[in-house]
Image: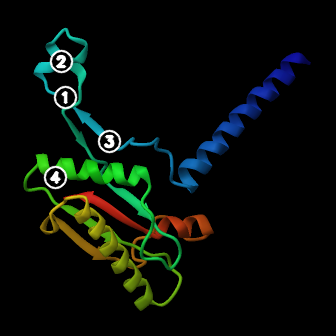
Amino acid sequence: MKKTIFLFIALLILWIAGCTYCYVCNIRKDCSIENAGALTVQKADSLNSDSPTALEPVVQVPPAIFSVYFDFNMSTCELTDADKQHIELYKKYLAENPGKRISVSGHSDDKGTAQAKSRISIARASFMKQKLQESGIEPNLIDEAGKGDAEFAADNASPEALARSRRVDIQIK
């Protein structure tokens, strides 16, 4: 009897863990930990040193795509500390890598007319471009585009999915 109860509890724990994983990763699309997209590159010659400071990062590479989220029908938002850190990361990366550019693309959910969705996505991209410029990134290094509801972040079947589609994606080109 004790073995049956133990087996049942173990299966219950595995089922809960699996459901949690499916919800977080497949439905919310949020499996990554903070700054999981940031990669630290080190100097090869510093790895041979015996000093404890030999593993200091030299260059941090920004994530492939970083998204900033907006409220419904809003073309501006309050940037979080994480957003500001990513902007600084992009600024440093561009300063150390001449010839690279940033692409800023605004997106909307599927609510409203095509014209309204296009207008809000362009306004969101412009807002983010302005914030990048205010941080010190040259305007000629930033490409901006409004994509309306052409590229959903999720299936838009729930309020959470709609919220994930109201965003600006920033990426290195």
Task: List the residue tagged with mark 3.
Answer: 38
* In this rendering, the label closer to the viewer, 4 or 1: 4
The answer to whether 147 appears left or right of 33 in the picture is left
The answer to whether 62 appears left or right of 154 in the picture is left
Task: List the residue tagged with mark 1.
Answer: 42
Please, what secondary structure does the residue beneath circle 3 have? loop
Crowding at label 3, few (<14), some or many (≥20) Cα neighbours within 10 Å?
some
Task: List the residue tagged with mark 4.
Answer: 94
Q: Residue 49 in the image: state x and y as whole percent.
A: 15, 12
Give, as a three-letter code, the residue at label 1: Gln
Whichever of labels 4 and 3 marks the residue nearer the N terminus, that label is: 3
Task: List the residue tagged with mark 2.
Answer: 47
Residue shown at 39% from the left, 41% from the top: 36
Give, as a three-letter code, the residue at label 4: Leu
Whichever of labels 2 and 1 marks the residue nearer the N terminus, that label is: 1
Residue shown at 44% from the left, 55% from the top: 80
Query: Which picture quadrant has residue 47?
Result: top left
The residues tagged by marks 4 and 3 sit, at their Cα atoms, a distance apart of 15 Å
- Pointers 2 and 1 in contact (CB under 8 A)? yes
Q: Residue 10 in the image: state x and y as whole percent.
A: 75, 27
Whichever of labels 2 and 3 marks the residue nearer the N terminus, that label is: 3
